[in-house]
């Protein structure tokens, strides 16, 4: 048996255990190195949450609650769907990219971005780029971030609409998290040391809702109230996003994200226990014939498309939006950047690994039947007869829906989770329950990114409008808050309602990873200015790597997919994103050169020796 053959005979438990070991060692070694040597976090410096406390956006928050908010905000559909789609190449490319990308790229990205924002009044990536590089670079960064954020929120919302329409039980659970969150927010705000009590109460109410919802949502009981069609859900999600963006952060957004984190982490722990007990074999081979392209799920070779297919879970530019949006305005101590930034990203990496295992423990034929369009699957089975369906008819009969051709990754993940859970003792008759629970679990993941992302979008608009109309710079001016919140929500909400954004969803992976590269490059500029010397390589190397692989993937998308198919709109949008990022990168690299050439040092207001002082 050669090495590759041995990789084709592996148990999911082996991969899960190895991943936990890698992440634990990384946190205790590389994470602490980044915190102490690269960033030199200082507990004595006053953070924006304390210095600019306003009870609305700048609110010092318990680090455990903040971890919950940050994790819930960054962990949307990406760590669930991306690894499932990447399973087309086999389990090995995805597993390696999740481990290496998360430890050396994504977690570092999240830490340095959060650090940069905390040192710049909790402001956006565009504001940081403007101060650290220049006004032109800052303006272009702001435009690029807004474009990517609108695209991201619309795409995530459409995935949520697909999961929750005409699914009363899933919708009911998602809705009840909102009043529970408000109650938790009031307790944590007005009761001394109320975090523990609010947590216990919130979890108890959520569990009660989950247990009772399955029977309450029958059509003859309350199911008719929550059996919303696509149009209704498409209107409700932007309305929720608007409320979360304008209400005080402690009232709805943070406690709901904190509550959702228990559901997210609890479900992943349940899945982990399921793998430990069932010990399923990984049925997807280490490498499939589609690593060189021609696959029915992802139309491209494993290199470079693995790097844009698995974004969240390895490294994601969307995290930069959260790391320069809500989270830095609530951090009470710089030292907590390690726990919140690096720790939350490692947790998301483990979620991505579990999603990959859920997909790869299915029969390969079942996986491709769900994730391939019907015509493509027919052609696939003609070329590879061994990829016929095996267990899929069983799941269709028990769940009650046709699962063929439900592309996008979400349904196959739900089936994969149900496949593991049903093999637990006495669980076989609960297949439909586990499937619907998994769908609801995915919807909660998505919504917690939508609320935080909408709030960050409001921040961006306020910053940009404030340069023309100074009143918008007043963070407490309620007309400005409501106006920018409504405008930004309309931008992505309209696309959700019309569904037009679905045609440009493939650009999300490209634009998201370009934003991650941009954030790393901008933050490296700040580290060079702060005279970190060779330590700045910790963010420069993954930043340059992401620039190379993402532009490579973007070039292939435009020249070999969009243009040959006469998809000119997609080609123009893809080229536009790469052009915007080129301007940012050119400005940053020019600033790098000047900073590296600078030999004289200055002393800033905090007594640090830096190459250049800027207004922070």
Image (spheres, rainbow, N blue to C red):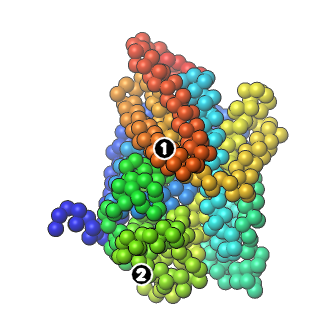
Task: Say if 293 sits above or below 375 in the image.
Answer: above
Residue drawn at x 54%, y 76% as measured from the top left: 403
Q: From the image, which quarter does the N terminus lie in?
A: bottom left
Q: Residue furthest top?
A: 600
Characterize the local packing of mark 1: few (<14), some (14-19) or many (20 or more) Cα atoms within 10 angstroms.
Answer: few
Q: Residue 427: image x %, image y %? A: 48, 84
Q: Which residue is mark 2?
A: 390
Task: Say if 168 sits above or below 40 in the image.
Answer: below
Q: From the image, which quarter does the C terminus lie in?
A: top right
Closer to the observer: label 2 or label 1? 1
Work out whether mark 2 precedes mark 1 in sequence or the reverse, and give the earlier one.
Answer: 2
Quadrant of res 131: top right
Residue drawn at x 51%, y 44% as measured from the top left: 558
Is residue 195 visible in this depiction of the protein?
Answer: no
Residue drawn at x 50%, y 74% as measured from the top left: 415
Seen from the viewer's position, the closer of residues 384 and 161 is 384
- Residue 465's label in the rendered image is none
Q: Which residue is mark 1?
A: 559
Quadrant of res 402: bottom right
Q: Residue furthest left?
A: 1
Alpha carbons under labels 2 and 1: distance apart: 38 Å
Q: Residue 457: image x %, image y %? A: 67, 43
Determine whether the residue tagged by mark 2 lies in a helix, strand or loop.
loop
Is residue 514 visible in this depiction of the protein?
Answer: yes
Residue drawn at x 66%, y 68% as measured from the top left: 164
Determine whether the residue tagged by mark 1 lies in a helix, strand or loop.
helix
Quadrant of res 15: bottom left
Characterize the local packing of mark 2: few (<14), some (14-19) or many (20 or more) Cα atoms within 10 angstroms.
Answer: some
Q: Answer with left or right where residue 557 lies relative to residue 235.
A: left
């Amino acid at each position: 048996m050669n090495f590759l053959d041995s990789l084709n005979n592996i148990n999911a438990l082996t991969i899960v255990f190895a991943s936990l070991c890698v992440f634990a060692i990384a946190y205790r070694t590389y994470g602490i190195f980044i915190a102490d040597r690269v960033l030199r976090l200082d507990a004595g410096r006053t953070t924006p949450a304390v210095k600019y406390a306003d009870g609305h956006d700048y609110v010092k928050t318990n680090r455990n609650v903040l971890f919950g908010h940050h994790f819930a905000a960054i962990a949307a559909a990406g760590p669930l769907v991306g690894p499932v789609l990447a399973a087309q190449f086999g389990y090995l490319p995805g597993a390696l990219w999740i481990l290496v990308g998360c430890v050396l790229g994504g977690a570092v990205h999240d830490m340095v971005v959060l650090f940069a924002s905390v040192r710049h009044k909790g402001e956006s990536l565009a504001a940081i780029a403007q101060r650290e590089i220049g006004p032109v670079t800052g303006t272009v960064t702001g435009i690029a971030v807004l474009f990517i954020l609108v695209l991201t929120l619309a795409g995530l919302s459409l995935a949520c609409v697909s999961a929750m329409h005409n699914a009363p039980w899933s919708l009911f659970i998602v809705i009840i998290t909102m009043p529970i969150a408000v109650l938790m927010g009031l307790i944590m705000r007005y009761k001394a040391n109320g975090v523990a009590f609010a947590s216990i109460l919130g979890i108890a109410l959520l569990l009660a809702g989950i247990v009772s919802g399955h029977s309450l949502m029958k059509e003859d009981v309350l199911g008719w109230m929550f059996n919303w069609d696509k149009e209704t859900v498409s209107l409700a999600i932007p309305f929720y996003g608007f409320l979360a963006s304008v209400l005080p952060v402690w009232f709805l957004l943070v406690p709901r994200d904190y509550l959702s984190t228990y559901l997210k982490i609890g479900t992943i722990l349940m899945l982990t226990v399921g793998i430990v007990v069932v010990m399923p074999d990984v049925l997807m081979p280490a490498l499939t014939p589609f690593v060189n392209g021609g696959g029915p799920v992802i139309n491209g070779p494993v290199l470079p498309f693995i790097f844009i297919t698995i974004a969240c879970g390895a490294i994601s530019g969307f995290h930069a939006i959260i790391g320069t949006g809500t989270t830095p305005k609530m951090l009470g101590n710089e030292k907590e950047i390690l726990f919140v930034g690096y720790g939350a990203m490692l947790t998301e990496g483990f979620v991505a690994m579990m999603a990959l295992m859920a997909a790869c423990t299915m029969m390969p034929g079942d996986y491709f039947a769900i994730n391939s369009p019907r015509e493509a699957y027919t052609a696939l089975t003609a070329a590879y007869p061994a990829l016929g369906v095996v267990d899929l008819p069983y799941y269709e009969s028990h769940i009650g829906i046709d699962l063929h051709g439900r592309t996008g990754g979400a349904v196959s993940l739900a089936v994969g989770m149900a496949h593991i859970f049903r093999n637990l003792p006495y669980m076989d008759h609960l297949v439909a329950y586990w499937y619907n629970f998994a769908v609801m679990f995915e919807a909660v993941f998505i919504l917690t990114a939508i609320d935080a992302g909408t709030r960050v979008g409001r921040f961006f608009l306020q910053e940009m409008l404030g340069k023309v109309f100074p009143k918008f710079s007043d963070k407490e001016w309620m007309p400005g808050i409501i106006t920018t919140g409504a405008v930004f929500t309309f931008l992505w909400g309209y696309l959700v309602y019309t569904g037009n954004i679905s045609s440009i969803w493939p650009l999300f992976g490209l634009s998201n990873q370009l934003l991650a590269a941009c954030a790393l490059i901008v933050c490296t500029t700040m580290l060079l200015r702060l005279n970190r010397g060779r330590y700045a390589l910790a963010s420069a190397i993954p930043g340059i790597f992401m620039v190379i692989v993402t532009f490579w993937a973007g070039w292939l998308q435009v020249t070999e997919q969009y243009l040959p198919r006469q998809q000119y709109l997609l080609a123009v949008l893809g080229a536009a994103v790469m052009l915007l990022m080129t301007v940012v990168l050119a400005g940053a690299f020019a600033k790098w050169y000047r900073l590296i050439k600078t030999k004289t040092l200055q002393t800033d207001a905090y007594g640090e020796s830096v190459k250049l002082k800027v207004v922070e």
